[in-house]
């Protein structure tokens, strides 16, 4: 792979008089481009996302902690940025890689240019990169560690940057949930966004739900509230007593970043306790992976993670195919699951486990993101399935 950007729509960085930003990979590869966003640097795992919309939601998804995002869609910035479309107040992604310069905003909801938003959140970005070639590299060889650096004077210490990329330990074995979780318990209020009126008040709640925050996206909490849940959010390190003192009718296990086995050191014993108490449980993404660990399964780092808004998943019970939004670099090992656990969903890309459920208890999870933001809403029904499980459990 060369440092030159070969896209017909992007200038060749080698023809740029002075590169003001670099991507430096751990193997010594250097990609030159134009700096955008904040003048700073960051080290992380470089992954790609294929979504055509929702770049602000992606950059604020806590599941991207420790990662630099290579956007395959070239027109990033076309809807600007606004204070409503964030998934957490603390930006987790470390930077982004673009093919073209940031597009001028053209949307009625735009409140800020995306470049200004990046600067305000101290995030570096680089444009003029052949994002297709970088994507192929990631697809074929896995997500590399690298440094993104924006420096207006174009003076870079490349050997030092290579050393920094090599020294970064990577996500395997890394617990990042503690970095992105809430620091204290709080009550969530507010329902989904609708074009007429923006965010709506949630309907009158039917059941109490405790959401364990391993890096929860706000739209997940909105979906729970919209489905009739009175949601209390507790930190990732909450104990069983911390959860039960709220007298929940059900427990939600949120998405989040990092290695599930690392976070599971303190989270899995709590999940096992909650399963033993026959509480209805619903997990998403990292919550799905740690539920599998609590049930006796195993997880592993994927050679090629799933990140995008067009992933087909088959519901093995109904035969229906859902187009889903995904963001994960670890997976549940199907062969490790015990007999009491059924695989409910499979990826039609690579057949990985996309959903599981206990056969004897109201406990289930999915690997993908039914709340979307960004992405399709094919899977919103899962929040109502969780509420139905709670209703059935209460009726017993």
Image (cartoon, grey):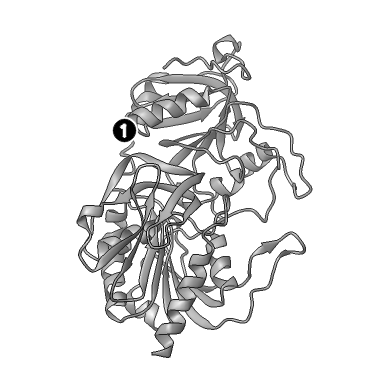
Residue extending furthest bottom?
396
| Residue highlighted by disc 1 | 167
Q: Quadrant of residue 34?
A: top right
Of 165 and 378, which appears nearest the observer? 378
- Secondary structure under tag 1 reads helix
Task: Residue at 50%, 75% (x, y): give it.
Answer: 232
Q: Is residue 166 visible?
A: yes
Q: Number of marks in the image?
A: 1
The x and y percentages for residue 19 are 56, 17
In the rendered image, which quarter contains the N terminus?
A: top left
Q: Position of residue 319 (x, y in %)?
A: 42, 57
Q: Nearer the viewer, residue 156 or 189?
A: 189
Residue 194 vertical position relative to residue 230 in the rendered view, above or below: above
Q: Is 349 positioned to the left or the right of 231 in the image?
A: left
Question: Residue visible at 54% across and 53% down?
Answer: 90
Q: Give the class, few, some or many, for how many residues have Cα within 10 Å of label 1's Cα (few <14, many ≥20).
A: few
**Residue 132: x, y in percent?**
50, 25
Report the front residue among 257 and 287: 287
Residue 64 vs 126, above or below: the answer is: below
Query: Which residue shows up at 37% across the image and 67% down it?
Result: 364
**Residue 314 x %, y %:** 42, 53
The residue lying furthest to the front in this view is 319
Q: Quadrant of the C terminus?
A: bottom left
Mark yes or no: residue 188 visible: no
Q: Quadrant of the rendered structure where residue 284 is? A: bottom left
Examine the rendered structure and indicate whether residue 104 appears above or below residue 325.
above
């Amino acid at each position: 792979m060369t440092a030159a950007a070969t896209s017909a729509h992007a200038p060749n960085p080698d023809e740029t008089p002075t590169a003001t930003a670099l991507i430096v990979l751990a193997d010594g590869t250097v990609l030159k481009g134009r700096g955008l966003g904040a003048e700073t640097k960051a080290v992380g795992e470089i992954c790609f996302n294929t979504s055509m919309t929702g770049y602000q939601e992606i950059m604020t998804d806590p599941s991207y902690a420790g990662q630099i995002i290579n956007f395959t869609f070239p027109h990033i910035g076309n809807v600007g940025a606004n204070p409503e479309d964030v998934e957490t107040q603390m930006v987790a992604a470390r930077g982004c890689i673009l093919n073209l310069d940031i597009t001028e905003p053209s949307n009625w909801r735009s409140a800020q240019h995306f470049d200004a938003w990046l600067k305000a959140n101290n995030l570096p970005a680089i444009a003029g990169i052949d994002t297709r070639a970088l994507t192929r590299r990631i697809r074929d060889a896995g997500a590399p560690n690298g440094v993104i650096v924006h420096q207006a004077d174009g003076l870079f210490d490349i050997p030092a940057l290579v050393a920094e990329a090599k020294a970064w330990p990577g996500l395997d074995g890394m617990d990042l949930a503690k970095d992105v979780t809430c620091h204290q318990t709080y009550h969530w209020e507010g329902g989904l966004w609708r074009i007429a009126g923006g965010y709506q008040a949630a309907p009158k709640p039917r059941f109490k739900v405790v959401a364990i925050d391993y890096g929860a996206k706000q739209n997940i909490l909105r979906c729970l509230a919209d489905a009739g849940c009175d949601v209390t959010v507790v930190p990732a390190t909450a104990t069983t007593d911390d959860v039960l003192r709220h007298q929940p009718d059900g427990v939600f296990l949120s998405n989040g970043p990092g290695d599930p086995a690392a976070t599971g050191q303190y989270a899995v014993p709590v999940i096992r306790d909650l399963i033993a108490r026959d509480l209805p449980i619903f997990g998403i993404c990292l919550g799905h992976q740690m539920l599998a660990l609590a049930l006796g399964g195993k997880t592993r780092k994927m050679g090629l993670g799933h990140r995008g808004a067009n992933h087909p998943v088959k519901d093995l019970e109904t035969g229906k195919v859902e187009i889903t939004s995904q963001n994960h670099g670890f997976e549940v090992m199907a062969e490790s699951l015990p007999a009491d656990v059924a695989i409910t969903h499979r990826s039609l890309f690579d057949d990985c486990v996309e959903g599981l459920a206990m056969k004897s208890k109201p406990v289930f999870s999915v690997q993908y993101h039914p709340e979307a933001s960004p992405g399709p809403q094919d899977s919103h029904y899962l929040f109502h399935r969780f509420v139905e499980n709670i209703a059935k459990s209460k009726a017993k």
